[in-house]
Amino acid sequence: MIRPVPDASNQFYLDHINLLRQSYERLTGKTFGPSGLTGVALAQAVYEAPYVVVSHGIEPDPIFNYANLTAQKLFEFPWVEFCQLPSRQSAELPNQTERQQLLDTVSRQGFIENYQGIRIAKGGGRFWIKNVTVWNLYDGEGIYRGQGAIYSDWENIVEKL
């Protein structure tokens, strides 16, 4: 199912932002999103934030189910394409094993901080993501719902000729 682009009509996916926020705060003890905001204002602020927020679901080959505007710009995928993309495809094939090891560690530990790795945009541009926090998403009943990631540090890799 293709999820519509976040906007006021769907409250910028407030329920999903609350899942991200509550899981993040419970696991890391840190605040998620701009302080002082709640509800739809928080969800909109996260969608429009100058840092990356992404998440994927629990499919056997997890599919991205959220990508804020900064993530969409960085990875060069509009919302509709991003939310149909297997998250493993955010890394080049040689880097997918390392990425999966990271996600397996997060599954065991609950979260990991200060991760860095190479990712690839739709157009083929490569970039480092740095100081990434990845965490497990659990709903109010403790049911596992996927994983989220947040970071504000990335650097384009310039290919030398």
Image: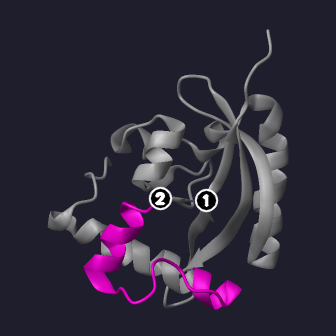
Of residues 147 and 149, which is closer to you in this image? Answer: 149
Residue 53 appears in the rendering: no
Using the image, determine if residue 15 lies above or below residue 84: below
- Label 2 element class: loop
Q: Are marks 1 and 2 in contact (CB under 8 Å)?
A: yes
Q: Residues within 10 Å of mark 2 (few under 14, many from 20)?
A: some
- Label 1 element class: loop
Residue 90 appears in the rendering: yes
In the shown orientation, is residue 19 left or right of residue 112? left
- The answer to which quarter of the image holds residue 15 is bottom left
Q: Which mark is residue 152?
A: 1
Is 32 a magenta residue?
yes
- The answer to which quarter of the image holds residue 26 is bottom right
Q: Residue at x 51, y 90 (%)?
A: 141
- The answer to which quarter of the image holds residue 142 is bottom right
Q: Amino acid at mark 1?
A: Ser
Of residues 3 and 161, which is closer to you in this image? Answer: 161
Q: Amino acid at mark 2?
A: Pro
Tell me where residue 46 appears, x and y as whole percent: 41, 68
Tell me where residue 10 appears, x and y as whole percent: 21, 66
Between marks 1 and 2, how big is the CA–CA gap? 7 Å
> Where does the C terminus fall, quadrant-wise?
top right
Of residues 79 and 146, which is closer to you in this image? Answer: 79
Is 123 a magenta residue?
no
Tell me where residue 54 appears, x and y as whole percent: 53, 58
In the shown orientation, is residue 95 left or right of residue 41? right
Q: Which residue is the site of mark 2?
A: 50
Q: How is the structure coloured here?
A: one colour
Q: Residue at x 52, y 41 (%)?
A: 74
Which range is magenta? 24-49
Mark 1 vs mark 2: which is more N-terminal? 2
